[in-house]
Image: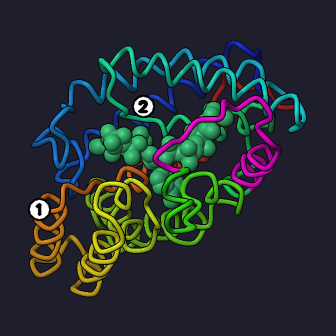
Amino acid sequence: MTWRSVKECRETLSNWAVQALVEEAELAPKPGLVDPEDTGSHSDLTFDLMVSSANSLRETFGLITEVSYLREPDQRLREEIADIGREGEKNMMQATGGTNTHKGAIWVLGLLTSSAALNKPGVGIKGTIQTASKIACYPDRYAPITTTNGSRIYENFGVKGARGEAESGYPHLINIALPMLKESRSKGLSEPLARLETLVSLIAHLDDTCILHRGGLPALEIAKVMAHAVLQNGGVSTLKGWRKLEELNETLLERNASPGGSADLLAATIFLDKITKKDYLNKKAMSTI
Ligand SMILES: CC(C)(COP(=O)(O)OP(=O)(O)OC[C@H]1O[C@@H](n2cnc3c(N)ncnc32)[C@H](O[C@H]2O[C@H](COP(=O)(O)OP(=O)(O)OP(=O)(O)O)[C@@H](O)[C@H]2O)[C@@H]1O)[C@@H](O)C(=O)NCCC(=O)NCCS
Ligand SMILES: Nc1ncnc2[nH]cnc12
């Protein structure tokens, strides 16, 4: 199977990337994060701003898809998408009036849309992740030398965050989020509950530099312990698990901490789920070769 045209590939993948971000924002109640019910630990964000930010990135994902279309992953491609990604960060900042909503999401979904465009449809989730990781491993030779929240965290705690996650092959997507989404669905959870359980399992395991940057090591440790408690008490579909989820939310709010990296990986999970749906693989717009 292949795409009928670069236009079809671009429109399909960029729509799914934006949709994944909107669906992540829509999911409620997310602990510490922005959703339609509240703004979590963020005083400078709203749900509408998250949606505007997501929509401002359609062009970024579209351009990444276009330059990646049926190419090989190599150093030149890495540099081309880095340029587009940085431009995307500027567009996002313009759309939000200067608040960082989706930097981590641009990174992960940029790599995944690039990978999905250079592979043929049907390569599957693992193949898509492997290529995304391969692209991330090429050096970003023209990156401006600046201090970021991530670089400070690396200096202080040795935690590699979003970059490390990509370079090591997205272990939290492969080993935590995707299996949890599958398991929760097979237990009969509704789609929103299955996604919420997936988010909680990410918070329980990920070294989220957004939490670290805002609340330090104690916040990261307590967030992980409390997210584990949600799962150990039956998960979000049980009364006891739900109570633990509320406690996790209260603790994150008290510490002004936000699991933004986990939210980005949830959006990546939703995107990967879309690219393996049967209706996409069998879509009549796709020609079989
Ligand atoms: C390689 C880059 C990711 C840049 O790396 P760097 O280390 O400089 O990263 P950060 O600036 O810290 O941003 C990384 C964002 O990734 C999310 N994240 C955190 N932990 C993880 C994790 N373990 N795994 C995966 N993803 C993770 C997180 O994003 C979310 O939180 C953001 C808000 O957080 P923060 O910036 O800390 O801001 P605030 O809390 O609001 O604090 P203040 O700044 O206001 O004080 C939000 O954006 C969420 O998305 C991290 O923030 C990569 O970005 C890069 O190199 N880009 C260049 C272009 C490129 O190469 N592109 C190629 C593909 S497009
Ligand atoms: N829903 C959300 N709230 C706050 N930060 C985020 N980063 C990515 N998604 C987010």
Report the residue that reaches farthest toward the bottom.
232
Q: Residue at x 60, y 65 (%)?
A: 174
Q: Amino acid at mark 2?
A: Gln
Label 2: which secondary element: helix
Q: Position of residue 242 (x, y in %)?
A: 13, 72
Q: Is residue 129 at all visible to an observer of this figure?
A: yes
Q: Which mark is residue 254?
A: 1
Question: Relative to the observer, which residue lies in front, 232 or 206?
Answer: 206
Label 2 neighbour load within 10 Å: few <14, some 14-19, many 20+: many
Residue highlighted by disc 2: 19
**Disc with the residue nearer the chain's start (2 vs 1):** 2
Check the image and report above or below for 122 versus 93.
Answer: below
Question: Relative to the observer, which residue lies in front, 13 or 156?
Answer: 156
Q: Is mark 2 within 8 Å of ligand 2?
A: no
The quarter in which the C terminus is drawn is: top right
Q: Amino acid at mark 1?
A: Glu
Q: How is the image coloured?
A: rainbow
48 displayed left or right of 239: right
Q: Position of residue 102 (x, y in %)?
A: 42, 35
> In which quadrant of the rendered view does residue 115 lie?
top right
Check the image and report above or below for 81 versus 161.
Answer: above
Residue segment shown in magenta: 127-150
Foreground label between 2 and 1 = 1
> In which quadrant of the rendered view does residue 203 lie?
bottom left
> In which quadrant of the rendered view does residue 279 lie?
top right
